[in-house]
Amino acid sequence: MEPDPRPIVFAGPSLACLPAAERVLLDVRPPARRGDLEALLRRERPGVAVLIDGLFGWSLAVTPTECRELLMAGWTLCGASSMGALRASELWSVGMIGIGEIYTMLRLGHIRADDEVAVAYHPDTHEEITVSLVHVRYVLDRAERHLARPGLASRALDLAREIYWLERSWQRLFATWRGHGLDEALIEYSRAVAPDVRRHPKVLDAEQAVRSVLAGIWIPNAT
């Protein structure tokens, strides 16, 4: 049997808003864990894989070595949004293709820590239970611009960094900010913006990545 020619995409919540008409063009699999990329090496012919979401903490994460071996075997490997952006920022020099704003921030060193993208997932639905710092940054930036008060969000971001990533929920953040006397207008605007999944930075980057792959952008020998 011929292997499925569709790009293989490892994703969870970051691809939640992708329309069904585009999703059927992809072989979408759950967030990657260690061994998932290695398993692709058993396919008869190399293909295209897109690493978006991956498991952190409670499950062994995809390693740079797995990504490198896939590239050496002739696969085209793209990374974006979350775990994919992390690995692409580490492996761009050996051919992994990074896509999106989060990848760019990592690649340029504007953000560095794994917990900028790390979240806890629901074990069955893979919905986000906690909040990544890249999402907090986006929400605070929106709030600061809306309130027209430069520098307002800096203390809020510092407090968010102090919360361990497995415990960093929006409710915990709002309570922490309020407990430290942060501006109530910042908290309330953030509370209104945070649920807007379609403006989530990981979602935006994930959709850009898969649409770029489907269009053949940055993919060698695409037709």
Image (cartoon, rainbow, N blue to C red):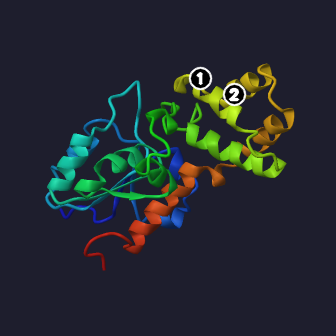
Task: Where is residue 203? Give x, y as percent.
Answer: 55, 52
Question: How many discs appear?
Answer: 2
Q: Which mark is residue 57?
A: none
Asked whether the residues under the numbered discs 1 and 2 touch, taking CB atoms below 8 Å apart as contact, a structural biologist would say yes
Left or right: 85 in relation to 13: left
Q: Is residue 67 above or below residue 114?
A: below
Kindly state the secondary structure of the residue where label 1 is placed: loop
Q: Is residue 23 visible?
A: no
Residue, far top: 179
**Which of the 4 quarters of the picture holds residue 54?**
top left
Badge 1 amino acid: Ile
Residue located beneath label 2 in the image: 173
Q: Is residue 6 above or below residue 147?
A: below
Residue placed most toward the observer, 117 or 61: 117
**Which of the 4 quarters of the picture holds residue 159?**
top right
Which one is earlier in the sequence, the residue at label 1 or at label 2? 1
Q: Locate the N terminus by quadrant.
A: bottom left
Q: Is residue 96 above or below residue 182?
A: below
Q: Is residue 5 visible?
A: yes
Task: Where is residue 90? Give x, y as percent.
Answer: 32, 46
Q: Locate the C terminus by quadrant.
A: bottom left
Task: Give the residue drawn at x 35%, y 69%.
Answer: 218
Q: Which mark is residue 163?
A: 1
Kindly state the secondary structure of the residue where label 2 is placed: helix
Badge 2 amino acid: Leu
Left or right: 100 in relation to 17: left
Left or right: 170 in relation to 32: right
Task: Where is residue 180? Give x, y as percent.
Answer: 77, 21
How far apart, in angstroms, are the residues tagged by discs 1 and 2? 8 Å
